[in-house]
Image (cartoon, helix red, strand yellow):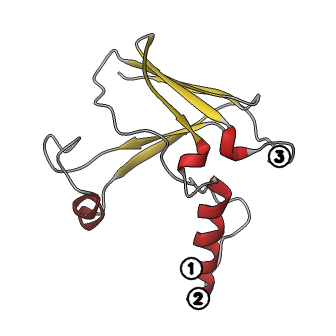
Amino acid sequence: MPSVELGDSRMRDWIGRAAAADILADSCGNAGIIVGGELHSIRGFDLRYTGMVVEKNGELIATGAMGAVMGNPAQSVAWLANKLASFELGLEEGELVLSGALTGAERMQAGDVLKATFGGGLGGVGVKFM
């Protein structure tokens, strides 16, 4: 499904300054997830070449290809499943798993509109910040 992660941190002005380790140690890098469109089977998709375009207030701010996530986002999900299995844990049916970011973080404020459109017929997702 098309989705966008809402990042957050207790650290002031963290975008572009905080290292990944700092955000993980702070344990608050995610404020939520916006999911849109409909659920698609990955059959018939070559995820490596599926692209994404991100717009803020109608202006193009980022592009990406899913191949940026470990060569194929399915690889990152497989890694997670295998890592959990090493602790005798697993993914449960119905759980939402984000495979990894295709773009960097973007500062948003009240009134901003963010839209991400994915290729291959996956669709898009958008949000207006209030």
Q: Quarter-wise, where is residue 74 in the image?
A: bottom right
On the image, the x and y values in percent for residue 57 come to: 40, 12
Query: Residue 92, position in %: x, y?
Result: 69, 69
Q: Which residue is mark 3?
A: 41
| Distance between the alpha carbons at the discs numbered 2 and 3 | 27 Å
Please, what is the three-letter code of the amino acid marked with disc 2? Ser
Callout 1: few (<14), some (14-19), or many (20+) C-alpha neighbours within 10 Å?
few
Left or right of residue 11: residue 33: right
Could you tell me how far apart the alpha carbons at marks 2 and 1 are, in whole angstroms? 5 Å
Residue 85 position (above or below residue 51): below
Give above or below for 45 relative to 81: above
- Name which residue lies at 79% across and 41% down: 40
* 16 shown above or below 89: above
Name the outermost residue toward the top.
58
Q: Residue furthest left?
A: 12
The residue lying furthest to the right in this view is 44
Whether pointer 2 and pointer 1 mark residues with C-beta atoms closer than 8 Å, the reply is yes
| Quarter occupied by the C terminus | top left
- Asked whether, in this view, residue 16 is left or right of residue 69, the answer is left
**23 or 51, which lies in front?**
51
Residue that label 2 marks:
86
Q: Quadrant of the N terminus?
A: top right
* Viewer-closest of 117 and 128: 117
Which residue type carries mark 3?
Ser
Q: Earlier in the sequence, mark 1 or mark 3?
A: 3
Earlier in the chain: of badge 2 and badge 3, it is 3
Find residue 18 and name its label: none
The image's mark for residue 83 is: 1
